[in-house]
Image (spheres, rainbow, N blue to C red):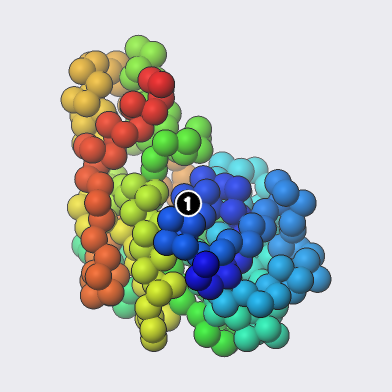
C-alpha cells in the first residue's frame, strides 16, 4: 500500500469518486464524513484521524446552492469554521492539505476566460464561503494547494444539480424549466476527471498553491439540453422561467496548470452524459 490519505466528505458524490481513484492507485484511505459519525466541527476527531496521514483531502462542505441559501449559518459554520478546524489540525500535525474550492469563486468577474490569476467575484453564498475557506487556509499556512473545481457531474450525482434534473425529466418525458435565457455557460466536467486531477495534484511535488481542475470547453445550458436530447433520442419540452438570484453568466475556465502536471480529461460532455444515462436506465 502507498501513503495514507485522509479524505473528509468521503461519503459524498465527489468523495466516493476520489476514494475510488485513490484506491485504484494503491493509496490507503482514512474515511471521514458526518454520515459515518466523523465531524469536521470536532477538532479532536480530526487530529485523531490525521495520525500518520501524509495528506488531507478536504472535500466536506455544504455544497448544494439551495441548501446554502436556506441555511446560511450552517453553510458558514461548515464551509468556513469547519475548514479552519481542518487547516489548524493539518498545521499542528505537519500534514499536507488539498482543499476543494470552486471555480464559482470567479463569479461574474467580467473575464471572457478565467485562469488562476483572474479576479474573483462570487455571486452565491456557497462560493463566498468557499473563498473564505481559501483565505483561512492561506492564513494558517503550511503545505497546501487550493483546488478550484469546475461544475462536475456523473452517475449518482446530487439530484438538485441541473444536469441530473434535465436527464431525469427528459427520460420521463417531463417539462424542463430553464432559468433565464439558457445562454449561461459552464465547463461541465465528469466527476472521474475531477478525481483523477486531485490525485495528480496529490502526486505532484511543489504543486501550485491555487489550481483549477476543469474541462476547457464551455457549454451553455441550452447546449446541455441539446446534447442530452441527442444522446437520449428524446425531444424535450422546454419552458424558460425567471432567472435565479446569483446566476453566473459566463464560466469559461482554463486549467493550464493542471495540464502542465500531465492531467487530461478522459470524458467529453457527450460521452459523460451517455455514461449517466446508461446508469439511470440500469
The residue shown at (27%, 18%) is: 236
> Could you say which quadrant of the image residue 264 lies in?
bottom left
The residue shown at (22%, 26%) is: 231
Position in image of residue 173 (x %, y %): 35, 12
Up-down relation of residue 235 to residue 246 (above or below): above
Up-down relation of residue 98 to residue 78 (above or below): below
Position in image of residue 209 (x %, y %): 42, 81
> Could you say which quadrant of the image residue 229 lies in?
top left
- Provide the residue designation for mark 1: 20
Of residue 108 and residue 78, the one placed in the foreground of this image is 78
Q: Secondary structure at mark 1?
A: helix
Is residue 205 among what the camera can see?
yes
Q: How many neighbours does mark 1 have within 10 angstroms: few (below 14), some (14-19), or many (20 or more)?
A: some
Of residue 54 and residue 136, the one placed in the foreground of this image is 54
Position in image of residue 182 (x %, y %): 28, 36
Q: Where does the C terminus fall, quadrant-wise?
A: top left
> Could you say which quadrant of the image residue 89 lies in?
bottom right
Of residue 90 and residue 176, the one placed in the foreground of this image is 90
For residue 1, side relative to residue 52 (left or right): left
Of residue 168 and residue 119, the one placed in the foreground of this image is 168
For residue 81, side relative to residue 66 (left or right): right
Q: Residue furthest front?
A: 1
Is residue 179 among what the camera can see?
no
The residue shown at (64%, 68%) is: 83
The residue shown at (64%, 57%) is: 31
Amino acid at each position: 500500500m502507498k501513503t495514507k490519505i485522509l479524505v473528509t466528505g468521503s461519503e459524498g458524490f465527489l468523495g466516493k469518486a476520489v476514494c475510488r481513484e485513490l484506491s485504484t492507485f494503491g493509496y490507503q484511505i482514512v474515511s471521514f464524513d458526518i454520515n459515518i459519525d466523523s465531524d469536521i466541527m470536532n477538532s479532536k476527531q480530526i487530529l485523531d484521524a490525521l495520525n500518520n496521514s501524509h495528506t488531507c483531502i478536504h472535500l466536506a462542505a455544504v455544497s448544494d446552492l439551495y441548501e446554502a441559501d436556506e441555511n446560511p449559518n450552517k453553510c458558514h459554520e461548515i464551509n468556513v469554521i469547519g475548514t479552519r478546524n481542518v487547516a489548524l489540525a493539518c498545521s499542528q500535525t505537519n500534514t499536507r492539505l488539498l482543499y476543494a474550492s470552486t471555480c464559482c469563486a470567479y463569479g461574474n468577474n467580467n473575464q471572457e476566460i478565467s485562469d488562476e490569476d483572474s479576479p474573483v467575484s462570487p455571486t452565491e453564498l456557497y462560493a463566498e464561503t468557499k473563498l473564505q475557506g481559501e483565505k483561512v487556509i492561506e492564513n494558517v499556512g503550511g503545505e497546501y494547494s487550493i483546488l478550484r473545481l469546475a461544475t462536475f457531474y456523473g452517475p449518482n450525482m446530487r439530484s438538485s444539480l441541473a444536469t441530473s434534473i434535465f436527464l431525469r425529466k427528459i427520460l420521463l418525458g417531463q417539462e424542463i424549466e430553464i432559468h433565464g435565457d439558457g445562454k449561461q455557460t459552464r465547463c461541465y466536467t465528469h466527476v472521474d476527471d475531477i478525481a483523477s486531477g486531485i490525485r495528480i495534484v496529490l502526486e505532484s511535488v511543489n504543486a501550485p498553491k491555487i489550481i483549477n481542475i476543469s474541462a476547457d470547453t464551455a457549454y451553455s445550458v441550452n447546449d446541455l439540453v441539446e446534447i442530452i436530447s441527442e444522446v437520449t433520442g428524446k425531444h424535450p419540452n422546454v419552458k424558460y422561467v425567471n432567472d435565479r438570484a446569483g446566476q453566473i453568466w459566463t464560466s469559461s475556465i482554463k486549467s493550464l496548470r493542471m495540464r502542465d502536471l500531465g492531467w487530461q480529461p478522459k470524458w467529453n460532455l457527450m460521452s459523460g452524459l451517455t455514461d449517466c444515462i446508461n446508469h439511470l436506465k440500469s
